Amino acid sequence: MSNFNINDIRKQFPVLDQQVYGKPLVYFDNAATTQKPLCVIERERDYYLHENCNIHRGVHYLSQMATEAYENARKTVAQFINARQAQEIVFTRGTTESLNLLATSLGQLLVNEGDKVVVSAMEHHSNMVPWQQFLDRINRIEADRINRMDNLLVIRMDKNGVLDLNHYEELLKQRPKIVSIAHISNTLGTVNPIKEMIAMAHKYNIPVVIDGAQSMAHQVIDVQDLDCDFYVFSGHKMYAPMGIGGLYGKMEWLEKMPPYQFGGEMVDTVSFEKTTFNKVPFKFEAGTPNVGAALGLETAVKFIQSFDRQEVEAYEDELLRYATEKLSSIEGMHFIGQAPKRNGLISFVIDGIHPYDLGTIIDKMGVAVRTGHHCAEPVMTFFGIPGTVRASFAMYNTKEEIDIFVKAVNRAATMLR
Amino acid sequence: MTIKEIQDSIVEEFSMFDDWMDRYAMLIEMGKECPIIDPQYRNDNYLINGCQSRVWLHAEKRDGKIYFTADSDAVITKGIINLLIKVFSGQTPADILAADMSFLDEIGLKEHLSPTRSNGLLSMVKQMMLYAEVMNG
């Protein structure tokens, strides 16, 4: 029996039930961060009310309980994405920290001066700048050098926002050391054919990092089926608290990789002459972790799992289809990103209207969307636009909200023309 | 008119509207009436950073007074810069530097014109003050 009842779901997100500027809030900025259900908020609160303690070091009761809860959270996340073992999950602050960890640590392990790394033309800055800066550092390139594309190879995309797999194959022939690509584009909504792209890279024995920031809340992720080497994500984009996220890595990689940050927790033995490091995943978790948020993440995972995933996906796809259809009727409408396989969000511009103006006006009508370049400036440059308006959906959004949104866009467009 | 007189008249104009939509409509109108920058200055040297939309600002001094022209790719931003141009254009550098900007709080667009918004209002005011400082004396 289905338990997907939109009214019941919305009751679990009290933040949605409010007015802004005297209008009911329509929250369509879920790709930036999702709202949190009561169960997640209560879990984190409970931790601080009854369980707060530093983990992995105390012999006393509370510390052991907190340690156990934290390690159980790791197991839950591992099982959620079908990792082989819980130790393949490293807790981080989120996708950005996970990618910085990889650019630093996997980079140090695999990439030498002159070596190449592949990203795609639709990456979020977080999956481009860490690689670019790492490559600049090892190649001793000055920050203001104009032509710095020699080592960072970029997979081309077409006008619909679809990656060119022939070009990708050409780039792989240059024997890059690492491939790092988004599962779902945060600006275009494109669902990339990552399973195929991972298999293509593996033919050349190149490890693949997948940026899953936009996919975890919407799609069933099976890292063994994908056979990706790394999969990174943020908790706060999947109904969990801010400040927690993760990095899945195949154990054989994690064992070989050097630590990223140093300090407490991640060490084995320490003297002034020499330090040896703790085992995976602890060697990547220096310092006191965000235990409360990790428990909130575990609860968010269980919240997502409490629904039929196919049903939620179908519901969200229907929201996307409905929004696309309704927006299409607006004069001068151009959708940015028209890949056949899209998920979770819709990005657009309207002739003669700046996205900033549109976002400002519909904000006053209670509609929260994101405007601007969405931390993907190269994508905007590619399409020759200053930015887009982006509406992104979560399981608690409704068609009624889309109607309000489309009406608001229409009114704003009339004002601004 | 003095800066204070112009500010008062702008506040009065905005206070005629109760509805936020009318106030924005007025800001949009002001955007459309902005004294447009000479195309030769519409380049990165005259760009003000600090907002989602781009704003170009040019100033020149004639008979001891500063005259501003500007442009933006977003019309609301253009309305904001024109609001400031109305206040400052044709004034002496000394008067501009001495101006009290509290009138911005009184025109009923506070949530929009507040410094935490990424509209670059502060950067615009700062840039105008900078011109006044350089052209002073």
Image (cartoon, coloured by chain):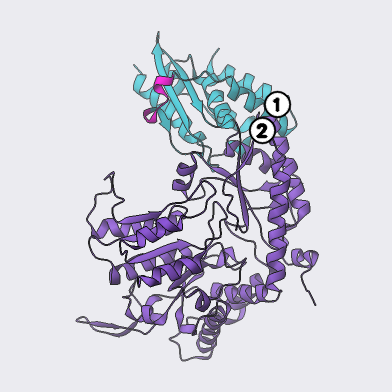
Chain colours: A purple, B cyan
> Visible in this render: residue A265?
no
A53 part of magenta stretch: no
Q: Position of residue A34 (x, y in %)?
A: 62, 61
* Residue range of the region highlighted in magenta in the rendering: B39-45
Above or below, B121 against B42 in this view is below
Q: Position of residue A223 (x, y in %)?
A: 51, 75
- Judging depth in this view, the residue of A387 and A165 nearest the camera is A165
The residue wearing badge 1 is: B15
> Visible in this render: residue A228?
yes
- Judging depth in this view, the residue of A6 and A229 nearest the camera is A229
Residue drawn at (42%, 29%), measured in percent from left and top? B127
The quarter of the picture where the N terminus of chain A appears is: bottom right
Chain bearing tag 1 is: B
How many residues crowd around disc 1 within 10 Å: few (fewer than 14), some, or many (20 or more)?
some
Amino acid marked by disc 1: Ser
Between marks 1 and 2, how big is the CA–CA gap?
A: 7 Å
